[in-house]
Amino acid sequence: MGLPLLRLPHLVITKLVDLTSIKDLTCLSLCSKRARNILIVCRRQNRFKGKFISATVVSNCTALNVHYCEIEVIQISNLENYMKIGYSKFELPFSGLTVAVVKDDIRELETVEIGGQHVPFFRGKYTLFTFWEDETIGLRKCLDFARETFEMPVKLLEFSQKGMWAFDWINGWEEKIPKMTVRVSGIQDDKLKYVMENCESRTLKTRGGFVWSGDPKGYPSESFQFDLHELKAKSFVACTARWITLQNISTSFLEELEIRQSSMTNRDLNLFLRLWLVGGFPSMIPDDDVKGVK
């Protein structure tokens, strides 16, 4: 006979919640409205303080993580695709880990209610799988469910061409999220420019895009140009940004700029440092490594 959890005294339930992983709490909250309401009451004890939600919408995965950098992911998948091919392997967003998963029997799926909609559900070893006819609706419903249940903010969106809709949706929220990461591989120049012009987050990061390799399919293209002056973000991080020049930087209002690959020469960098030391680029915040340089 199972433990009648919901019949326990409130203090005991609160202690049990403190010892339970968010993945298991998410499963519990899907059992019934009463179970979810109890979790909402328990969250007032600062159980989830400092934690936040991360979302990813890329070519091979639509998912959200309710505790960043832990294997506690809710994956949103297309039911028809699942029935055709199942899942044998997937890459966990944000962690870079690859986990092998045995193809699950479709008959083992349960049905749960999320956001007023009944959907197939499976609790895997590492991931909670939900299946939707429309993944865009699935992510919206799951994000709203997690935000309301755990009262956590969304602080990161990582997306590719597939996730442009998610960028428009989340970017339009009244409460802006602090960071967005766009995987530029596969995104056309006009779409990338659109993101850079309209991103309301404080930090915008572009990931991927190896145009320096000479790959004709590289993104952004070698002809890509963008005026950093038009960036709304205050912090810009780019793995590859050969389009950035010293003059481009000089017109920006950025507080932080990090570039891994660029077309700037040592001479450009020396000139930048000399200008910065005499008061140029006043909005840029000095890194700890260069504080005190004269």
Image (spheres, rainbow, N blue to C red):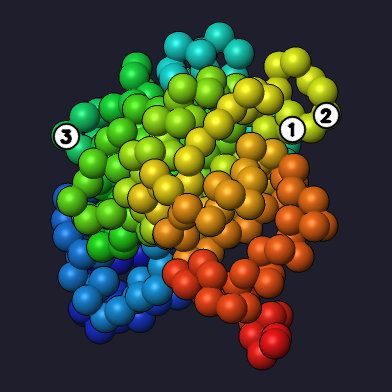
User: Picture coordinates of residue 288 (x, y %)?
Assistant: 64, 82
Q: Amino acid at mark 1?
A: Phe
Q: CA distance from mark 2 to mark 1?
A: 6 Å
In the rendered image, which residue does mark 1 sit on?
A: 210
- Assess whether mark 1 and mark 2 are in contact (beta carbons under 8 angstroms): yes
Indicate which disc residue 213 carries. Answer: 2
Q: Mark 2 belongs to which amino acid? A: Ser
- Using the rendered view, name the quadrant where residue 132 is placed: top left
Any mark on residue 280, and which? Answer: none
Mark before the other along the chain sequence, 2 or 3: 3
253 sits left or right of 281 in the view: left
Query: Is any part of residue 206 visible from this angle?
Result: yes
Q: Kindly identify the residue that appears in the image at 70 percent across and 87 percent down.
A: 294
Name the residue nearer the viewer: 215 or 248.
Answer: 248
Instruction: Count residues near mark 2 (Cα–Cα under 10 Å), then give few for <14, some for 14-19, many for 20+.
Output: few
Which is more foreground, mark 2 or mark 3? 2
Please identify the quadrant where the N terminus is shown. Answer: bottom left
Q: Residues within 10 Å of mark 1 (few under 14, many from 20)?
A: many
Kindly indicate the quadrant of the structure image that contains residue 91: top right
Label 3 environment density (alpha carbons within 10 Å; few <14, some 14–19, many ≥20): few
Say what secondary structure mark 3 lies in: loop
The Cα atoms of the two marked residues, 2 and 3, are separated by: 48 Å
